[in-house]
Amino acid sequence: MPDGMCLKSRDGNRQNTDPSNWELIDRALLPSLNGGSWRGLAYDDVAPEVKPALMALAQLRRAKGEAKRRARA
């Protein structure tokens, strides 16, 4: 596994070992997915149809932050 990356279970069930349930994500997304940036809306606790939207928002926020950091440098 590359440095700075981790596996996230897509359905929120870490006991589901089906390979299609796991997604390689940037470790920096974890605070957002754990509810830190969503005011208590944690990825593992939302309905299945909301999970893809939360993942996309976390990735978008991460990309925005990275772009801002690069622009300052």
Image: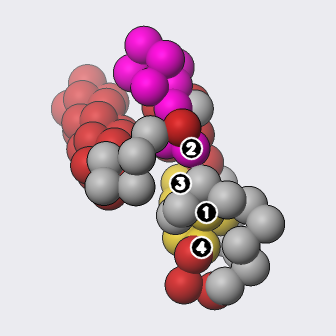
Circle on res. 42: none
> What's under tag 3, amino acid-wise?
Asp
Q: In terms of depth relative to the viewer, which is nearer, 53 or 47?
A: 47
Q: CA distance from mark 2 to mark 4?
A: 13 Å
Q: Is disc 1 surrounded by few (<14), some (14 to 19) or many (20+) residues within 10 Å?
A: some
Please name the residue shown 49% across and 17% down the image: 40
SS at mark 1? strand
**Mark 4 lies on residue:** 22
Front residue of 68/51: it is: 51
Secondary structure at badge 4 equals: strand
The reply to whether callout 2 and callout 1 are in contact (CB within 8 Å) is yes
Which mark sits nearer the N-terminus, 2 or 1? 1
Q: Count residues near mark 2 (Cα–Cα under 10 Å), then give few for <14, some for 14-19, many for 20+.
A: some
Q: Residue at x 71, y 72 (%)?
A: 16
Q: Main secondary structure of the magenta part?
A: loop
Residue 27 higher or lower than 36, as above or below: below
Give the residue at mark 2: 44
Q: Do the CB atoms of the residues marked 1 and 4 lie less than 8 Å apart?
A: yes
Asked if disc 2 and disc 3 are in contact, CB closer than 8 Å, the reply is no
Which span is picked out in magenta?
Answer: 35-44
